Image: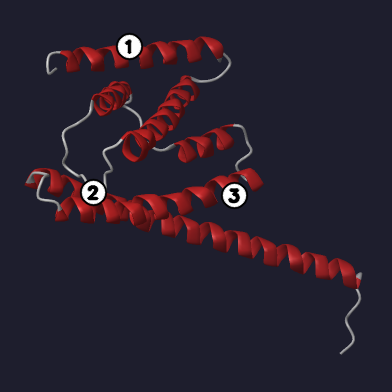
Amino acid sequence: MLLTLPLRAACSLLAWLSLYAWFCRRYKHRSYEWSCRLVTLTHGILATCLSAYIGFIDGPWPLSHPGSPNTTLQVHGLCLSLGYFLFDLCCEITNPLLQARWFLKEMGCYHSLSGDVVDFFFVVLFTGVRIGVGAWLMYCELASPKPRWYIKLGGVVMYAVSWVFMVSICRFARRKTMKKYHAWRSQRGEELCLRTNGHLKSH
């Protein structure tokens, strides 16, 4: 099994490189960054769906069996992502909503309802999944006697990193909300001026 893991990771890396090369040929009029982001978006969607299937359908249930031996499907999923991480060493590794946000910016559509929807769901999902569900998973891992101490320590560190990102996300959400509010106030003031047609209101 151990001898085949490097081979699986190498095959995964080759697959991601091939996908990147195909995207570069398919979107010649776009930058290489565009193709790299497409690979990242593809991995984000694939890894999220595969992880959800492994964790909540195929099993074992992560909240009651932390530290159990890896299944064959789990090993395949890990090798798939390991190959991608080797490909993506030079980029920021994020999730599908962040990739969608980048594409909207690239196409000039970020400052629209679509951009607001993507940002809203990113904040909600990050808070609910990374902070909420993450806390539950960390508790189950710490309470279980099966995981080794360094696995538990790694889980705590990863959760702490999520909170660092959460603080930044809250600041971003506050700035964007205040900017939208001030723009709305300014627009409303202009509309009131137009309604009075330049005449003073009677008191």
Residue 60: x and y in percent read: 26, 38
Q: Is residue 92 visible?
A: no
Question: Residue 72 lies in what quarter of the image?
Answer: top left
Quadrant containing the N terminus is top left
Tell me which colouring the rendered structure shows.
secondary structure
- Asked if marks 2 and 1 touch (Cβ < 8 Å), the reply is no
What residue does disc 1 label? 14
- Asked if marks 3 and 1 touch (Cβ < 8 Å), the reply is no
Question: Residue 88 lies in what quarter of the image?
Answer: top left
Q: Which mark is residue 64?
A: 2
In the displayed structure, would residue 113 be above or below residue 177? above
Among numbered discs 2 and 1, the one appearing first in the sequence: 1
Q: Nearer the viewer, residue 100 or 175?
A: 100
Q: Which mark is residue 92?
A: none
Tag 1: residue type?
Leu
- Asked if marks 2 and 3 touch (Cβ < 8 Å), the reply is no
Q: Secondary structure at mark 1?
A: helix
Tag 2: residue type?
Ser
CA distance separating discs 3 and 1: 36 Å
Q: Is residue 87 visible?
A: yes
Residue depicted at x 46% and y 36%:
96
What residue does disc 3 label? 116
Q: Secondary structure at mark 3?
A: helix
Residue neighbourhood size for the residue with mark 3, other residues' Cα within 10 Å, grouped as few (<14), some (14–19), many (≥20): some
